[in-house]
Image (spheres, helix red, strand yellow):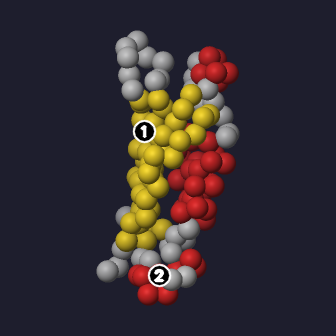
Amino acid sequence: MSVQKISLNNLRFYAYHGVEPQEQSVGAWYVINLDMYADITASLQSDELSDTLNYAQAARIIKEEMQVPSKLMEHVAGRVVQRLQQEFPALQRLSFTIAKENPPVCAECGSASITVEAGD
């Protein structure tokens, strides 16, 4: 085993991202999914947090970035990915998806999302 995956699934945040003034003042619910890939083989034997990727720390980073208003979900995703890569040098690859629930479009829509993948 050389690469393992750690995931955070369906993190929910209320935030104020959007191009339209109403989106920026009213806000919306966002759902985040994150897959992080790294060689964390040592943690399988050691039982030490220092030998793995701390998903609680990753969740805090996401929460902090979600609190900074942006016009575009793409911008939020870019900031999160950059911070995760800086914070976790062992990270080989990641996939980050942000979805805005009930986006303001001309039809009924459950969510609009963007996925950013980085690494190998």
Task: Classify 70 as above or below 22.
Answer: below
The residue lying toward the viewer, choosing from 13 and 112, is 13
Task: List the residue tagged with mark 2.
Answer: 43
Residue 97, percent from left and from top: 44, 45
Task: Classify 103 as above or below 55.
Answer: above
**What secondary structure is marked by label 2?**
helix
Count up the numbered dots. Answer: 2
Could you tell me if residue 101 is visible in this image? yes
Residue 1 placement, left or right of 45:
left
| Residue extending furthest toward the left | 1
The residue lying toward the viewer, choosing from 108 and 68, is 108
| Residue extending furthest toward the top | 106
| Residue extending furthest toward the front | 47
How far apart marks 2 and 1 lie (CA) works out to 31 Å
Could you tell me if residue 71 is visible in this image? no
Task: List the residue tagged with mark 1.
Answer: 114
Is the residue marked by circle 1 packed among few (<14), some (14-19), or many (20+) residues within 10 Å? some
Task: Tell me the quarter of the picture where residue 15 sits.
Answer: top right
Task: Give the mark toward the camera: 2 or 1.
Answer: 2
Mark 1 is on which residue type? Ile
* Screen quadrant of the N terminus: bottom left
Q: Residue at x 45, y 46 (%)?
A: 10
Q: Residue at x 58, y 40 (%)?
A: 13
The residue lying toward the viewer, choosing from 22 and 91, is 22
Q: Residue at x 52, y 36 (%)?
A: 30
Q: Residue at x 63, y 30 (%)?
A: 16
Residue 28, percent from left and from top: 56, 28
Is the residue marked by circle 2 packed among few (<14), some (14-19), or many (20+) residues within 10 Å? some
Residue 41, percent from left and from top: 41, 81
* Screen quadrant of the C terminus: bottom left
Mark 2 is on which residue type? Ser
